[in-house]
Amino acid sequence: MNLNQVTIPSLNVEKATRFYKTLGLKLIVNALPKYVRFECPDGSATFSIHKVDHIMPEHGISIYFEEEHLDTWVHNLQKKGIEFKELPNDKPWLWREARLLDPDGNHIILYHAGENRKNPPWRIH
């Protein structure tokens, strides 16, 4: 089994599209104002956004994007006007993470975990 895509809700798909393009995703389907789909720069997963009339924050979504050169990526995004809630820092679970919100309040975690992403020292064998 392979994960094909993740789809998130948005109140304003056009605004969300600009945000995710700034993060570096490549737009491959443009059905604005109701739907868009992106390819990630690495790997084969895709990411899509669909229009909704309301978002329920209590059902919060967290989206993780991994990049080996996390600190450089975050610095470049800051220069493009992206605001972060938390700058890159090392976590007890052996990941380095930065955190921000997308235009709809979805939690975005930019991180680098390397081998620890799927094989932390506490992995069940």
Image: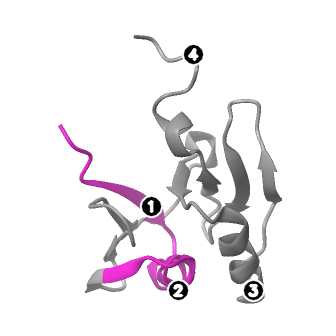
Confirm whether the magenta stretch covers residue 6: yes
Q: Which residue lies under the disc numbered 2? A: 18
The stretch in magenta equals: 1-27
123 sits to left or right of 50: right
Tag shown at residue 9: 1
Q: How far is disc 4 from disc 2 in space, using C-alphas?
A: 38 Å
Q: Which residue lies under the disc numbered 4? A: 122
Q: Tell me the element at label 2.
A: helix
Confirm whether the magenta stretch covers residue 16: yes
Q: Nearer the viewer, mark 3 or mark 1?
A: 3
Q: How far is disc 4 from disc 1 in space, using C-alphas?
A: 34 Å
Image location of residue 119, percent across then percent down: 48, 28
User: What residue do we see at 57% from left, 16% from top?
Assistant: 122
Q: Quadrant of residue 25?
A: bottom left
Contact between labelled residues 3 and 4, with CB atoms less than 8 Å apart? no
Q: How far is disc 1 from disc 2 in space, using C-alphas?
A: 15 Å
User: What residue do we see at 63% from left, 72% from top?
Assistant: 103
Q: Residue furthest left?
A: 1
Q: How far is disc 3 from disc 2 in space, using C-alphas?
A: 12 Å
Image location of residue 41, percent across then percent down: 39, 72
Q: Earlier in the sequence, mark 3 or mark 2?
A: 2
Front-most of 51 and 63? 63
